[in-house]
Image (cartoon, rainbow, N blue to C red):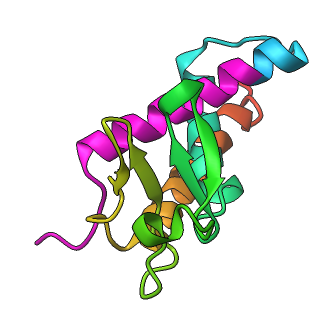
Amino acid sequence: PYTGGIGSFMLQMMIVSFLQHRERDFVHNRVPVNYNLGALLLEFLELYSMDFNYITVGVSVRFDGYFFPKGATDRKEHFWQPGRPFSLAMENPLDPTQDVGAPSFRMSLIQRSFEIAFKVLLSHVTEPAQPS
């Protein structure tokens, strides 16, 4: 049975946003770019499991991507859900007044799943080598 989750379009927007912000960090801070897919996956999982504030922050991929306050006067009507403050507000790039994240539910479970995946993967890449 279906117990919660996010749609494929929202997941794509989360990935696009992650890559946009990562590239911007490189350009502005001269942080070395690591295009290792494993490292990118770990960074994505870390962002959406431990670093991202689901309650106050929304995401847009328009104009090279940016984060916005969900409770801002011009955003609150479309992106703030008082009954579901933990939901991920994701602006639809084709219609800025539509929240792609609105149909998603149980985001705390998704966040926890990302956190577990991050910690399991990290434990496998940081585990000391076993003598053979």
Callout count: 0
Q: Residue at x 62, y 38 (%)?
A: 66
Q: Quadrant of the N terminus?
A: bottom left
Magenta-tinted stretch = 1-24
> In x, y percent, where is residue 95?
31, 43
54 vs 58, nearest the viewer: 58
Q: Is residue 120 visible?
A: no
In this view, 96 is above or below 34:
below
In this view, 92 is above or below 2:
above
Q: Is residue 60 visible?
A: yes
> In x, y percent, where is residue 124?
62, 38
Q: Residue farthest to the right?
A: 29
Q: Residue at x 64, y 68 (%)?
A: 56
Q: Residue at x 47, y 85 (%)?
A: 82
Instruction: Kindly report the secondary structure that dominates the magenta region of the rendered protein.
Output: helix
> In x, y percent, where is residue 88?
47, 61
Q: Is residue 119 toward the left or the right of residue 130 in the image?
A: left
122 vs 58, nearest the viewer: 58
> In x, y percent, where is residue 30?
87, 12
Q: Residue farthest to the left?
A: 1
Q: Is residue 103 toward the left or the right of residue 85 in the image?
A: left
In this view, 84 is above or below 94:
below
Based on the picture, tell me whether residue 15 belongs to the magenta stretch: yes
Q: Quadrant of the C terminus?
A: top right
Q: Quadrant of residue 101?
A: bottom left
Based on the picture, tell me whether residue 6 belongs to the magenta stretch: yes
Q: Residue farthest to the front?
A: 74
